[in-house]
């Protein structure tokens, strides 16, 4: 009969307990990280829902305006050139259109200029015209 070597039980139990602790710690940390990511995603989805709600309210307001009599009258007057009974349509012709300047980076700095320079694109008003 062969003799079995004498094994001490304490190192085996200690190693098994250590492995169990490492496994449980790793699993717990993984679940905590996953839970944190889910909370971040939930917060982002809630922000997106809030933005979509605001967009929806704005679109509903636009839809309601487009269905209103005010909008229909505006289109009839501006685009179709219609007038109400008793009104007279006046058409101004022969006026040369004023070229519209394209916005540039300098236009952002133009906010500190007087209103006439902003309106007429930097055209100086003679001092005698403003002194009257």
Image: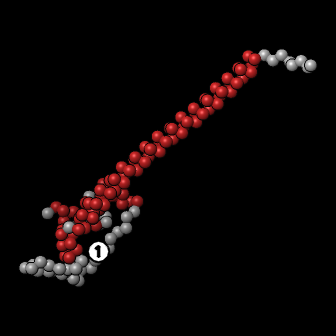
Quarter holding residue 59: bottom left
Residue shown at the point (86%, 18%) measured from the top left: 5
| Residue 132 x %, y % | 14, 63
| Residue 83 x %, y % | 14, 78
| Residue 68 x %, y % | 20, 67
Q: Is residue 124 visible?
A: no
User: Residue placed farthest to the left in the image?
Assistant: 86
Secondary structure type for disc 1: loop
The image shows a total of numbered marks equal to 1
Q: Quadrant of the N terminus?
A: top right
Quarter holding residue 63: bottom left
Quarter holding residue 22: top right
> In the figure, 123 relative to 92: above or below?
above
Count residues near mark 1 (Cα–Cα under 10 Å), then give few for <14, some for 14-19, many for 20+: few
Residue shown at the point (34%, 56%) measured from the top left: 55
| Residue 66 x %, y % | 25, 67
Q: Is residue 112 left or right of residue 25?
A: left
Q: Which residue is at the front of the view, 116 or 16? A: 16
Q: Is residue 102 visible?
A: yes
Q: Is residue 121 left or right of residue 35?
A: left
User: Residue placed farthest to the right in the image?
Assistant: 1
Q: Is residue 26 left or right of residue 84?
A: right
Q: Which residue is at the front of the view, 91 or 126? A: 91
> In the figure, 132 relative to 87: above or below?
above
Q: Which residue is at the front of the view, 99 or 73? A: 73
User: Residue placed farthest to the bottom in the image?
Assistant: 94
| Colour pattern | secondary structure
Q: Which residue is mark 1?
A: 98
Residue shown at the point (46%, 40%) measured from the top left: 39
User: Residue placed farthest to the front in the image?
Assistant: 1
Residue shown at the point (51%, 41%) measured from the top left: 37
């Amino acid at each position: 009969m062969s003799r079995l070597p004498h094994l001490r039980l304490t190192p085996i139990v200690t190693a098994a307990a250590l492995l169990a602790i490492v496994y449980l710690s790793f699993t717990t940390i993984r679940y905590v990280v996953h839970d944190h990511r889910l909370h971040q995603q939930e917060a982002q989805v809630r922000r997106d829902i809030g933005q979509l709600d605001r967009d929806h309210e704005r679109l509903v307001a636009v839809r309601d305006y487009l269905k209103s009599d005010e909008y229909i009258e505006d289109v009839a007057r501006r685009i179709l050139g219609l007038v109400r009974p008793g009104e007279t349509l006046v058409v101004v012709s022969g006026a040369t259109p004023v070229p519209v300047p394209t916005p540039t980076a300098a236009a952002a700095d133009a906010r500190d200029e007087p209103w006439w320079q902003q309106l007429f694109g930097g055209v100086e008003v003679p001092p005698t015209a403003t002194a009257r």
